[in-house]
Image (cartoon, rainbow, N blue to C red):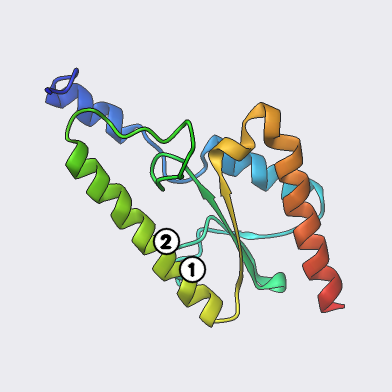
C-alpha cells in the first residue's frame, strides 16, 4: 500500500515531531516543580538521555510516547499500514535500546520511573502524576 502523502509532505510531517519538551513531558515537569522537586533535563552522559533527572534522589523519569516506544496493548500504538515491516523494526529497535539503557541505569544505582503518554491523558492524568509524586516522596523519605 502506498503512503497517502507524497515524500515531501511526509518528510515535513515527520520533522515536526518533537523529541523534547513534549506536552506529556511538560505535564510531568510542572507537577514535579510545583511539588518542590528540582531536576535536570535530558542529561547526555546518562544512558538513554533521560527526559528528567533528579540527581539528589538518584532517580530518572522517562516520558515515552506510546507509538515510538511500542506501548503494548495501548490504543495509541497502531502500526502503520504502509511500510509495516520497517516501522516494526524501528519500534522494536527503540524498545531494545530502552531496555539496554534501563539495565545500565539500574546497574549504576539509578531508580527509574517510566511514564507513557496515554497515562497522562485527561482521564488518567491526576492519578498518574499523584503516583509519581508519591514514589518520589518515598525515595526522599528513605534518604533522610
Extreme front residue here? Answer: 73
83 left or right of 48 in image = left
Q: What residue sits 52% from the left and 42% below the top?
A: 21
Q: Is residue 129 above or below residue 13?
A: below
Q: Which residue is mark 2?
A: 98
One can see residue 33 in this view: no
Q: Secondary structure at mark 2?
A: helix
Q: What residue sits 46% from the left and 76% below the top?
A: 104
93 left or right of 33 in image = left
**Nearest the camera: 104 or 89?**
89
| Figure label count | 2
Q: Is residue 96 above or below residue 87?
A: below
- Quadrant where the N terminus sits is top left
Q: What residue sits 46% from the left and 62% below the top?
A: 49
Q: Is residue 96 above or below residue 57?
A: above
118 left or right of 83 in image = right
Q: What residue sits 21% from the left and 37% below the top?
A: 84
Q: Residues within 10 Å of mark 1 (few under 14, many from 20)?
A: some
Q: Secondary structure at mark 1?
A: helix
Callout 2–callout 1 Cβ contact below 8 Å = yes
Instruction: Name the spot of residue 2 as percent of width and height, x first.
Output: 12, 22
Q: Which residue is mark 1?
A: 102
Instruction: Name the spot of residue 23 as percent of width and height, x first.
Output: 56, 35
Report how far apart the C-alphas of labels 2 and 1 lie in the structure.
Answer: 6 Å
Extreme bottom residue here? Answer: 108
Q: Residues within 10 Å of mark 2 (few under 14, many from 20)?
A: some
Amino acid at each position: 500500500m502506498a503512503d497517502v502523502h507524497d515524500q515531501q509532505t511526509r518528510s515535513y510531517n515527520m520533522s515536526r515531531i518533537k523529541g523534547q519538551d513534549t506536552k506529556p513531558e511538560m505535564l510531568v515537569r510542572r507537577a514535579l516543580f510545583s511539588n518542590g522537586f528540582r531536576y535536570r533535563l535530558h542529561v547526555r552522559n546518562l544512558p538513554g538521555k533521560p527526559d528528567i533527572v533528579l540527581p539528589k534522589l538518584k532517580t530518572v523519569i522517562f516520558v515515552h510516547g506510546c507509538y515510538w516506544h511500542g506501548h503494548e496493548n495501548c490504543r495509541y500504538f497502531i502500526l502503520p499500514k504502509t511500510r509495516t515491516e520497517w516501522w516494526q523494526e524501528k519500534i522494536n529497535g527503540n524498545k531494545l535500546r530502552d531496555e539496554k539503557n534501563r539495565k545500565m541505569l539500574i546497574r549504576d544505582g539509578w531508580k527509574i520511573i517510566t511514564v507513557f503518554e496515554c497515562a497522562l491523558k485527561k482521564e488518567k492524568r491526576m492519578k498518574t502524576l499523584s503516583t509519581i509524586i508519591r514514589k518520589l516522596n518515598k525515595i526522599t523519605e528513605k534518604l533522610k
